[in-house]
Image (cartoon, helix red, strand yellow):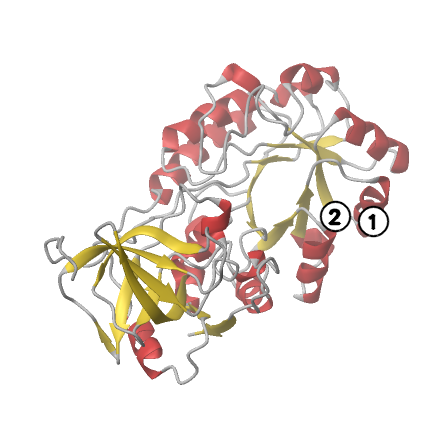
Amino acid sequence: MFSILFPMVSTTEAILPELIVQFAGKQNDSAPCYVYISSEIKRQCQKFSEIPYPHVSVHFATMANAMPDFLRIIRESGLGVFINTIGHLKAVEKAGFSPEEIIFTASASSDELLKLLGEKGITVNLDSLHQVNRWRDLFPKQPFGIRCNIGDSVSPMDTTGGVFLGSSSRLGLDLEEIRSLSGIPDINGLHLYVGTNILEMDYFLRCYNKLLELVNLFPGLEYIDLGGGFGVDEDLTGNEFDFKSYGEAVTQLFTKVSESYIRPLRIVFEPGRVIGASAGFFVSTVTDIKYRDEKQLVGVNASSAQFPRPLFYPEEAVHPAWLVRGNQLVDSMLVKSAVYGCSTYSRDYLSRSILLPQAMIGDKIILGNAGAYCNSAHTQFLGFEQAAEYYM
C-alpha cells in the first residue's frame, strides 16, 4: 500500500466553498461539469470600478471564457468585451454587446475581417504597419489604435504564456515602426499587453511608463489600452493581486500624463483570467486508482480535452484540488498524487503534481481556479463532449 504520507493540511491551504462541496455530494449525474459562483465573478469585476481614475473602461478578454452564461454576467456587471476573432465577435453580439462595447486586437487580420470591423464601428488596435496601411486605405480618416511592442526598453518578463515584449515577440509594432507613424491624427489609441499571470505591480508600471513616453507622438490620442495579465491567486490562499495599490498608482501616473496632454486620456483595461478563474470549479468522479513510484494516480471520468488549461500550460498550470466523499470533504493524511483522464492519450493529465487524501472509487475530485480557459477552450481532439455548466 501507499508509503509516503504528509502532515495533514488542507490540500493547498485553500478554502473550498461549502456550496461546492454540497453540489458535488448531491450531484445525481456523475458526468464531469463546471460549477461557477456568480457572486465571485461580479466581485472580480467590481475591483476595476473601484480604480479612482475618472476615465476608465473595462473590457473582459473573451479568450478566457466566451461561454454564453458567463458573458451574460459580464454584461450585467457593466463591462465591455475584448475579442480577437470573428467567432468571439459572434458570441459577444449574441450576448447583447453593442459595437461601442467591443474592442478588437489581433495579428495577421485579413482585409475581409478589417472591413467587417470597420463597417460595424468596432474599436480596433492594429498589429503591424501593413494593417495600418490597409486600414487607412479601407477607411480613410476613421480612427484606429496601434499595438505597441516597447521592445527592450524594459527587460521583458517571461510570463506564463511566454514573452510578449521585445525582439523575441512577434506581437505589435516595434519602437522604430511606431515612431514612423508619428503625427498621424487618426491614431487614437495605444495598446500594450505585457504578459500573463503577473503579480508584480512594479513590472506593469515600468512598462506603462515606457509606453507613455510615446504619447506626444500622436496628437489624436483618446485612450491608452493597458491590456490585462493580472495575476491569479493560484492556490486560493488570499494571495490576490493588489488592485487597491495598483489603482492608486495608475491613477497618479495617468493624472499626471493627462494634465500635460491635449485632453484627458481614457484608460482601457482588458482583464481575462483574473475575472473568472477563482469563480469556477471542475467536478469529476474517480473511476480508477493506480500507484506508481510512491505516487497515487487517480483516474477520473473526464479528460484534459474538457479541462484544457493543463494542455496549454503543462508545466505552469496549477489548480488546487479537493476530494469529496458523499457530501463531505475528505480531510485526512495527504499523499503525492496526480489526476489523469479516461483516454489513451499519455499526456491526458488534469493535474500532474498535487496532494490528495487516499481516494476511493466514486469519490468526487474538485479542481479550483477552473473558471478561465475552460469550456470555451474545449478541444475535439479526443472526442469528449463539452462538460455541462452550472451557476450558483
Residue 296 % position (x, y): 26, 58
* Label 1: which secondary element: helix
**Residue in the foreground of this view, choosing between 13 and 272:** 13
Q: Residues within 10 Å of mark 1 (few under 14, many from 20)?
A: few
Name the residue that disc number 1 marks: 116
Q: Please name the residue shown 30% across and 66% down the image.
A: 289
Name the residue that disc number 2 marks: 122
Q: Please name the residue shown 63% across and 27% down the image.
A: 170
Residue 187 % position (x, y): 73, 30
* Label 2: which secondary element: loop
Q: Please name the residue shown 85% across and 32% down the image.
A: 134
Compare marks 2 and 1 and give the one earlier in the sequence.
1
> In the shown orientation, is residue 22 left or right of residue 30?
left
**Residue in the foreground of this view, choosing between 192 and 168:** 168
Q: Give the quadrant of the N terminus.
A: bottom left
- Tag 2: amino acid: Ile
